Amino acid sequence: MDTEADLFYRQLPKVELHAHLNGSVSFETMETLMKRKPHLNIEHSMTAIRRGQRRSLDECFQVFKVIHQLVDSEEDILMVAKAVIQDFAADGVKYLELRSTPREVTETGLTKQRYIETVLEAIRQCKQEEVDIDVRFLVAVDRRHGPVVAMETVKLAEDFLLSSDGVVVGLDLSGDPTVGHGKDLLSALENAKNCGLKLALHLSEVPSQRDESELLLNLPPDRIGHGTFLHPEVGGSDSLVDKVCKQNIPIEMCLTSNVKGQTVPSYDKHHFQYWYKRGHPCVLCTDDKGVFCTDLSQEYQLAASTFGLTREAVWMLSQQAIGYTFAPEPIKQRLEKKWAELKQQILQKHFGLMQTIADIQQDHKMRTHFDLMQTIADIQQLQIYSWVTKSEAAEPLYLISVLMTVALVWQPNEEFVFSGLRVKAPTRASRGQSCELRQGSTPVCLRELPLMLLPPSLWASQHKRSGAPTATHLSLMKIVEVPPSGPCVTGRDVGRV
Ligand SMILES: CNc1ncnc2c1ncn2[C@@H]1O[C@H](COP(=O)(O)O)[C@@H](O)[C@H]1O
């Protein structure tokens, strides 16, 4: 069931800049592919790394080999590319730069030229079918295939740059980072740059790539993929960080991919934190949403909860990504306009309730006790209770704020039941005063709540520190947005103990 937060992150307009086509195939599309080729005996466990699972990077690359067996004809590529684009659109992605390595398969007659043409056909069909997403394509060079193939791929990419009506915009360098050295690919990459292809290069995805990154950063690339081991705290160097910062090169960050592929030990250790704190351009991406079982909404939500980003900051993060796309200026302007229009609808809708409660709390500080008692009636008139319903939306932030608004006007120490939660009013309704909440017989202690709106991420981290129940514990408590028709008063969940 979707929570209010899920809804927000899905509705958030997003830009996806690091997505490998064959790594982005959904469970459902995979199912169709498996049915088409039953003789391969491929199961889902061979194409995806599920929740809680981890693999070595090497094992991840084995997964791609399996997927490539399933996707080996023009027919497959068309289906997969269309499905992937539709998935991204359904996840609220408004602009997508898809990347893929052109392959030839003798048995099916697939050539690299036809491979790219088929992906472009999928993009064209989606556009014709008015799928709400702008899609561009990056031709990928697989580093494992060496300099000759790299040069051929660049030539192919250059041809499409000139003939694809702006859909092919750049070149990606990817593939198993433990194989080969970037110095052998330098000429091909220079050629690509000189002919106007934008460069999105996987850099320092593993620790051993320091020298290579030094070299490739001189090109310089237009964006960096992963950049996991660039900074000195993880074995990179100040010189690498200086180069990236001076040239202001955006970094594509793929949290789940890095954690599941074990190049990063845990979400909270992700290098997003390092770069984001410095104000460096960062863009959240999925990498391989099919293989790593994620989507871009989830990646934003994860980043926000792990690093305590406010909704405003999340919005900024997604909006700034427009500037890092390889799209021409008019497209960027169109996207900016779209973001501005949606901001009214989405951000303010989700902030509306919070603001109202903050106003009420502000009011409380001014009032006498009598007024406060009166305010409970006002609150009912403002129909806050009706926002607390049995619906699916459950943001602890809102819940606690509402609870505390009620608690503030209650007699000190008095208890009441609120949607099954036993709440004890604070003895003094002042900042810094702790307040006791119980779920069943379990006390939940949260400090300083009366006067602050606590983001779920912070709340979760407080819980970790205090050992109290997790945020999901209280997510049984539901709050929905204000219905457009105006809420109705119920108050039925509130009663004295
Ligand atoms: C996990 N991190 C990663 N690091 C480096 N390269 C990756 C990758 N994830 C995917 N690829 C590259 O993308 C190919 C699959 O999509 P396409 O067949 O091109 O659409 C992989 O074979 C690999 O070359």
Image (cartoon, grey):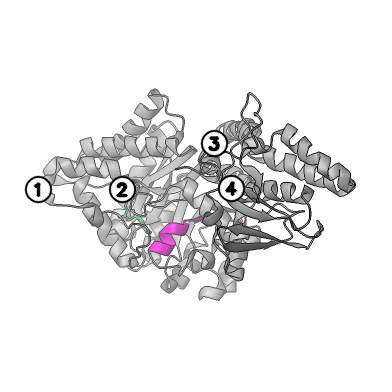
Check the picture and name the quadrant holding the N terminus: top left
* Location of residue 342 by image quarter: top right
Mark 2 and mark 3: Cα distance apart in space: 26 Å
Specify whether residue 455 is in view: no
| Mark 1 close to ligand 1, CB under 8 Å | no
Q: Nearer the viewer, mark 2 or mark 3?
A: 2
Q: What residue did someone put label 1 on? A: 39
Q: Earlier in the sequence, mark 2 or mark 4?
A: 2
Give the structural element (helix, strand or loop) at label 2.
helix
Q: Is mark 3 in CB contact (under 8 Å) with mark 1?
A: no
Indicate which quadrant contains ligand 1: bottom left
Dot 2 amino acid type: Asn
Q: Is mark 3 in CB contact (under 8 Å) with mark 4?
A: no
Q: What residue did someone put label 3 on? A: 328
Q: Nearer the viewer, mark 2 or mark 1?
A: 1
Q: Badge 4 local density, few (<14 within 10 Å), some, or many (20+)?
A: many
Mark 2 and mark 1: Cα distance apart in space: 20 Å
Dot 1 amino acid type: His
Residue found at x 56% / y 41%: 8
Q: Position of residue 320 (x, y in %)?
A: 61, 45
Magenta run includes residue 257? yes
Residue 203 is marked as none
| Mark 2 close to ligand 1, CB under 8 Å | yes
Q: Which residues are magenta?
A: 248-260
Q: Which residue occupies the extreme front position in the image? A: 497
Q: What residue did someone put label 2 on? A: 22
Q: Earlier in the sequence, mark 2 or mark 1?
A: 2
Mark 3 and mark 1: Cα distance apart in space: 45 Å
Q: Badge 2 local density, few (<14 within 10 Å), some, or many (20+)?
A: many
Q: What residue did someone put label 4 on? A: 395
